[in-house]
């Protein structure tokens, strides 16, 4: 899961890439969650489970139109493919998909 500063950087970079690609405006959200489940039966530990998940979403505005998409694959290539593939509204991904996300660490 991303740290708070990495998540802030990812959404800022995603919005900037959308604007460079031709969006009039954009907003983005990152959601990361984790949970731990502990089961005890008759006073004895029975099971422990841990899960994590993360997702990033983008909303684009072009003229009077808008689109919203999200992905749980946060790689730059996956996001470029997800957000810009097959668009008919003129939005294009950066020439190098790594330009889409440049998170600082």
Image (spheres, grey):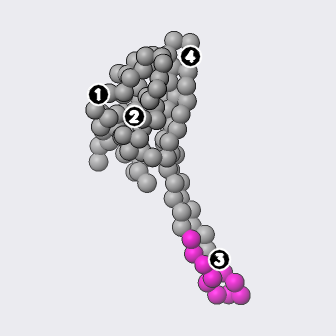
Q: Quadrant of residue 24?
A: top left
> Residue drawn 47% across and 23% down?
87
Q: Quick check: 70 above or below 85?
A: below
Element type at marker 1?
loop
Q: Quadrant of residue 36?
A: bottom right
Residue placed under numbered mark 1 in the picture: 95
Residue placed under numbered mark 3 in the picture: 39
Answer yes or no: is residue 11 visible.
Answer: no
Element type at marker 2?
helix
Distance from the alpha carbon under mark 4 to that under mark 2: 20 Å
Distance from the alpha carbon under mark 3 to that under mark 2: 41 Å
> Residue drawn 51% across and 12% down?
63
Residue 35: give x, y in percent of width and height. Answer: 56, 62
Q: From which residue to which does the magenta span run?
A: 39-49
Residue placed under numbered mark 2 in the picture: 80
Residue placed under numbered mark 4 in the picture: 65
Residue 32: give x, y in percent of width and height. Answer: 50, 50
């Amino acid at each position: 899961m991303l740290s708070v500063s990495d998540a802030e950087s990812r959404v800022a970079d995603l919005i900037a890439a959308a604007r460079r690609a031709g969006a009039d405006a954009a907003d983005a959200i990152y959601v990361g969650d984790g949970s731990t489940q502990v089961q005890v039966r008759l006073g004895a530990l029975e099971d422990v489970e841990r899960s994590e998940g993360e997702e990033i979403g983008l909303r684009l505005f072009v003229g009077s139109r808008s689109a919203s998409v999200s992905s749980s694959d946060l790689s730059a290539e996956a996001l470029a493919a997800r957000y810009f593939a097959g668009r008919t509204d003129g939005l294009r991904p950066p020439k190098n998909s790594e330009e889409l996300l440049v998170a600082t660490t």
